[in-house]
Image (spheres, rainbow, N blue to C red):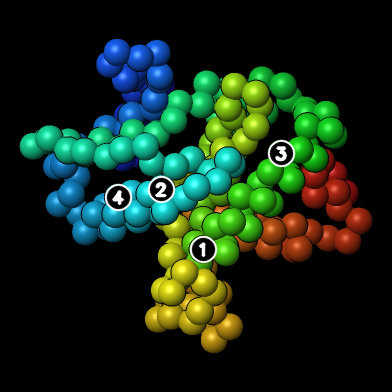
Amino acid sequence: MVGRGAYGKVLLVRLRGTERRFAMKVIEKSLLAKPSFVAYMKTERDVMARLNHPFLVRLSMAFQSRERLFLVMPFLKGGELFTRLRRAGLLMEAAVRIYAAEMILAIEHLHEHGIIHRDLKPENILLDDEGHICITDYGLCKVLPGGNKKKDRDSGEDGRAGAGTGTGEGSIVDAIKMQVALPSGADALHGSA
């Protein structure tokens, strides 16, 4: 097992007759009784199937049995950025610049296709065997109609997606709001005033 999430587990699998390895997300269909879960899974599958970018995890194949859904994607043996940050403590500035540039390119690609991630955090950024990032976990994405930044029923007048997204400790929007609310002279990165 490679990992476990809120909606299932991820296994390392190999394509028969080859050495090609994949990550396979296994989801119990019993969870489909919840309408929010159905929407989450449909969004994740649809977004992954649309993507073709080196810094975004894409769907290799999907199938189902009577009891389970299976989403198969490339295996990224570098693991989560979260784990790398926890082990390293600090990253060198050169590495941060590369990660930031790759994330910007990935997010731009999503936005060009009318997709807003809404759950970007170190746990949802994987690293490949060369250390490049790959954004994953698209279940909370907002897909704008028409494939671009158009107004829809959940958007504001300017076409932006609504708030109230993210998991765990909160969204990046919440983090930015916290930084803005700091007293003047406070160091947001180090927590000192």
Determine whether label 3 and label 4 are within 8 Å by CB: no
Q: Amino acid at mark 2?
A: Met
Determine whether label 3 and label 1 are within 8 Å by CB: no
The image shows residue 6 at horizontal and vertical percentages of 35, 39
Alpha carbon distance from label 1 to label 2: 12 Å
Find residue 182 and report its image quarter.
bottom right
Q: Amino acid at mark 4?
A: Met
Question: Considering the numbered disc 4 on the image, is that residue within a helix, a strand or a loop?
Answer: helix
Tell me what residue is drawn at x 52 percent, y 21 percent.
77
- Above or below, 13 against 182 in this view is above
The residue identified by callout 2 is 48
The image shows residue 176 at horizontal and vertical percentages of 69, 59
Q: Earlier in the sequence, mark 4 or mark 2?
A: 4
In the image, 154: left or right of 37? Answer: right
Q: Nearer the viewer, residue 91 or 169?
A: 91
Q: In this orientation, does residue 99 appear? A: yes
Q: Earlier in the sequence, mark 4 or mark 1?
A: 4
Q: How many marks?
A: 4
The residue identified by callout 3 is 99
Tell me what residue is drawn at x 76 percent, y 38 percent.
98
The image shows residue 20 at horizontal and vertical percentages of 40, 19
Alpha carbon distance from label 3 to label 4: 27 Å
The residue identified by callout 4 is 41
Q: Earlier in the sequence, mark 1 or mark 2?
A: 2
- Above or below, 162 against 73 in this view is below
Alpha carbon distance from label 3 to label 1: 21 Å
Determine whether label 4 and label 1 are within 8 Å by CB: no
In the image, 70: left or right of 145? Answer: left
Alpha carbon distance from label 4 to label 2: 11 Å
